[in-house]
Structures are given as C-alpha cells and as structure tokens.
Amino acid sequence: MARPMKWRKVCSLPENNKFGPLDLNVDEENSVRMTVDEYETIRLIDLEGFTQEECAKKMNVARTTVQGIYAEARKKIAQSLVDGKILLIEGGEYRLCDELKNVCGRGCHRRRRGWQSHDY
C-alpha cells in the first residue's frame, strides 16, 4: 500500500515566477519548471541561511526529502543559467502556511515582507 503524501509547508508563493531570457517562447524545449517546494528550499537554505535540518523542520518533511528537493532545485537553476532557458516556478506538493494558526517564525517570507495570511 502506498504511503500517504505529506504536503510540504511553504510560507508564500514567489512574487515572480518566470526568470531568464524572456524573449523566448515558453515551451518544453526552452524552459525548466521548478516547483514551489523546490523554490522554498532554495529560499530557506540559500537566502535565509537555514541548514537542511532546519529547512526540513520548517517544511514539515524529513531532512533526506529536503536534500533531494534542494539538489533538484539547484540543478534546474543551473540548467536555466547555463543553457539559457526560462525558469518557471509553479506546481508541486505544497500547502501555504497560515502564520496566524501555524506560526512560521524565523524565515517566514510573509512576516519579513509584512504580508498577512488573508492576502492569499
């Protein structure tokens, strides 16, 4: 029997979800798709300075899961930069946090920007 899916907790959606050579047509050949949960690992680890263990706790998943998500996200960023592809951030297995119910604490993107949960 398959294990039930565990949603990854994400503080907010990215303000921009399309990066790279924007004069290209967005199609499978010219783009790389990064999921929102992959974006969240990049944000937490590379921008906020979390360890993989801290990131895992924040996202409510195992450290090994974060390790895999993070490695895949970095590969996609490299593909976009090196191959000149559009990076699209969309989809994934995530749920947005509700800072009023599940206080996010340190590293919460909503709190840093002054966002409130009713903005989404």
Image (cartoon, grey):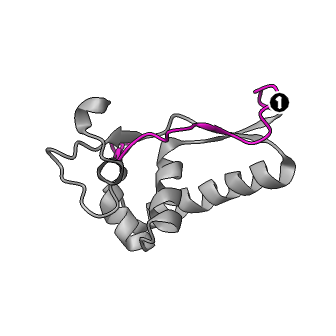
- On whether residue 8 falls in the magenta region, the answer is yes
The relative height of residue 67 versus residue 118 in the rendered view (above or below) is: below
The residue wearing badge 1 is: 23
Magenta stretch?
Answer: 2-28
Residue 11 % position (x, y)? 35, 47
**Quarter of the rendering containing residue 95:** top left
The relative height of residue 4 versus residue 74 in the rendered view (above or below) is: above
Q: Is mark 1 on a helix, strand or loop?
A: loop
Residue 98 % position (x, y)? 23, 42
Label 1 crowding class (10 Å Cα cut-off): few <14, some 14-19, many 20+?
A: few
- On whether residue 16 falls in the magenta region, the answer is yes
**Quarter of the rendering containing residue 16:** top right
- Towards the viewer: 89 or 62: 89
Residue at the spot x=61%, y=54% of the render? 73
Going by the numbered disc 1, the residue's amino acid type is Asp
Residue at the spot x=44%, y=70% of the render? 52
Residue 76 % position (x, y)? 69, 51
